[in-house]
Amino acid sequence: MWRIEPDWNRSYRRLLAHLAAGGTLTGPADCTGGDADPTFRPGAWLRKQDKAGAEEELTAQQTALLDELAVVEKAGPGTGTA
């Protein structure tokens, strides 16, 4: 994770915190990260990552981390990694 761009890593960690607080990977782009992080917009960030992935602008590590989140989301609560 250390080799990933710092801004990307920070946003990814904000997304993890959003998920840990009960948020989901789906929802409107303007939805905020909740009371804990009201300036973060997980939906907008994920849409940006989808576009970057389609344009092959993500590293293999970034793609793998995002793919892992999608698998954990589909598996349901309590099945994620620590």
Image (cartoon, grey):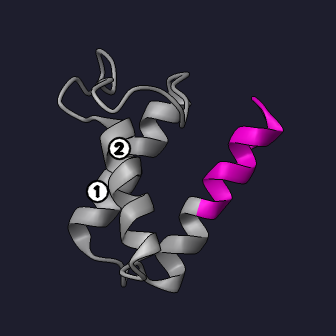
Residue at position x 55%, y 61% from top? 66
Question: Are dots 2 and 1 in contact, CB under 8 Å?
Answer: yes
Q: Position of residue 71 (x, y in %)?
A: 74, 52
Residue 24 sits in which quadrant?
Answer: top right
| Quadrant, the N terminus | bottom left
Q: Amino acid at mark 1?
A: Arg
Residue 31 sits in which quadrant?
Answer: top left
Q: Amino acid at mark 2?
A: Arg
Query: Which residues lie in the magenta part?
Result: 67-82
Q: Left or right of 23: which side holds 43?
A: left
| Pointer 2 residue | 14
> Is residue 81 among what the camera can see?
no
| Pointer 1 residue | 10
Q: Nearer the viewer, residue 54 or 60?
A: 54
Q: Nearer the viewer, residue 53 or 71?
A: 53
Mark 1 surroundings within 10 Å by alpha-carbon count, few (fewer than 14), some (14 through 19), many (20 or more): few
Queried whether the magenta region covers residue 74, the answer comes back as yes
Q: Is residue 58 above or below residue 42?
A: below
Residue at position x 17%, y 30% from top? 39
